[in-house]
Every structure is written in structure tokens, then in C-alpha cells.
């Protein structure tokens, strides 16, 4: 499957209805060459004004410069939880972000609303590359991204259908010691923005999940 941009494009991927997911994987090939100004996204979203959403947005750059992966989490319609990383390491099986369940301190967690899986490829040269300093070179159009090898592990309200995580065990899954070390390595070496440390953005205090 491919996304081709001569204008903004959004595709619904995978099942034709909203589903609860234990996990999903796919292989992506991002826009090649000079991709400055383009944003290739892969995200999960429920519907409605108080939707839940999990975003992976790949911000294009000049040829030879690394992509930036921009992540965000929405719960009950509220986002503003951005983290960004230079994409110059192997992502497969390497955790880059964890959004912990903090419902006990009043932070909603995206666990009950069925989601659909989407992809989009669009022009965001007002902010995507070096804060908007580098614009999209439309002489390079069309811009194309590719997706393949989709693997969905769906869940019902009671348990997952995946045999490896049956009886709802996915709800309590945590990173093992090795994965926690990989997560710290990525965050120490490749993270370039974290909303949880942006005191200028939150002068009245950081969000409760950051404390």
C-alpha cells in the first residue's frame, strides 16, 4: 500500500471497522530524497470530540539529514504530549516511548475506545522542517510513502485474540529490564523534545503524568 502526495491525503488502513488492539506492526518506507516539509503519519484514533489517539509522525528533512519522529498521545480529546526523536537508529523492537497508566492521579488512559488505523501524507512546511525554515520542494513531487506487512492483534472487551497474550494479559504488560535499558538509551541519545521538561510551555506546572 502506498500514499502519494500531490495534495494532503488520509488513508484508513486495516480493518474497515474500529477495533481494540493489543498490538500492531507494519513495515514503512518513508519519502525518499529531499522530503523537507512533508509529514508521513501512522496513527490510531477513535471517533468523536473526546477521542483517543496515538500518533507517529515522520517529519521530512533535506537529503542526508535524519528524519524526526514526532509522537503524541490524546486521551479524551486532550493531546499536547509531544516527544520527538532523531530517527537514526533501528526502531524495530526498540521502545522509544512509554505512556504509563496514571488514572489513579486523574490522567485518562486510552484503553476503552475502539480505534481505527490511519495513514496520511501531507504538506506541513510551515513547521515540520527546522521550524518551517525549509519549505517543500514541489519540483520533487509526487512524494510517496509505502506500507506493507501489516499484523494486527485485536482484543475484545474481555481478552485478546492473540494466543501469546490471552486472557487479557496485555493489560498488565510492562517492559522487561533489557527493554527499559534500550528505552533509556534512546531517550538519552536521540530525544530532542519532551513536553515533560518544557517549563516555558507549562508555566503553571507540568502535566500531572510528568511529575
Image (cartoon, grey):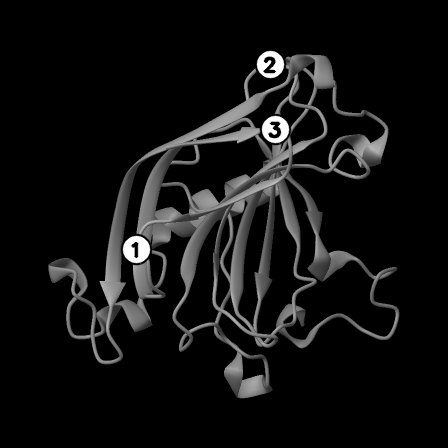
Residue 30 shows in the view: no
Which secondary structure, mark 2? loop
At x 72%, y 29%, the residue is 37
**Label located before the other in sequence (1 or 3):** 1
Within 10 Å of disc 3 (Cα), the crowding (few <14, some 14-19, many 20+) is many
Q: Which residue is mark 1?
A: 15
Within 10 Å of disc 1 (Cα), the crowding (few <14, some 14-19, many 20+) is few
Q: Residue furthest front?
A: 7
Quarter holding the N terminus is top left
At x 41%, y 74%, the residue is 111
Task: State which mark lies toward you, 2 or 1.
Answer: 1
Task: State which mark lies toward you, 3 or 2.
Answer: 2
Residue 108 as seen in the image, left or right of residue 20:
right
Task: State which mark lies toward you, 1 or 3.
Answer: 1
Q: Which residue is mark 3?
A: 67
**Label located before the other in sequence (3 or 2):** 2
**Label located before the other in sequence (2 or 1):** 1
At x 26%, y 52%, the residue is 152
Amino acid at each position: 500500500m502506498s500514499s502519494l502526495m500531490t495534495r494532503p491525503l488520509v488513508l484508513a488502513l486495516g480493518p474497515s471497522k474500529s477495533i481494540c488492539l493489543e498490538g500492531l506492526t507494519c513495515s514503512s518506507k518513508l519519502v525518499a530524497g529531499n522530503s523537507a516539509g512533508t509529514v508521513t503519519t501512522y496513527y490510531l484514533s477513535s471517533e468523536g470530540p473526546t477521542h483517543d489517539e496515538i500518533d507517529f509522525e515522520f517529519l521530512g528533512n533535506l537529503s542526508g539529514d535524519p528524519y524526526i519522529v514526532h509522537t503524541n498521545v490524546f486521551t479524551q480529546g486532550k493531546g499536547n504530549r509531544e516527544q520527538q526523536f532523531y530517527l537514526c537508529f533501528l526502531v524495530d523492537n526498540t521502545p522509544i516511548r512509554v505512556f504509563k497508566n496514571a488514572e489513579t492521579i486523574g490522567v485518562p488512559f486510552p484503553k476503552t475506545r475502539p480505534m481505527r488505523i490511519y495513514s496520511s501524507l501531507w504538506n506541513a512546511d510551515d513547521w515540520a522542517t527546522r521550524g518551517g525554515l525549509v519549505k517543500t520542494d514541489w519540483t520533487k513531487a509526487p512524494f510517496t510513502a509505502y506500507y506493507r506487512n501489516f499484523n494486527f492483534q485485536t482484543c475484545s472487551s474481555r481478552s485478546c485474540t492473540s494466543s501469546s497474550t490471552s486472557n487479557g494479559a496485555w493489560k498488565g504488560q510492562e517492559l522487561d529490564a533489557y527493554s527499559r535499558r534500550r528505552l533509556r538509551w534512546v531517550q538519552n541519545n536521540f530525544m530532542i523534545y519532551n513536553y515533560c521538561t518544557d517549563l516555558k510551555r507549562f508555566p503553571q506546572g507540568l502535566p500531572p503524568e510528568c511529575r
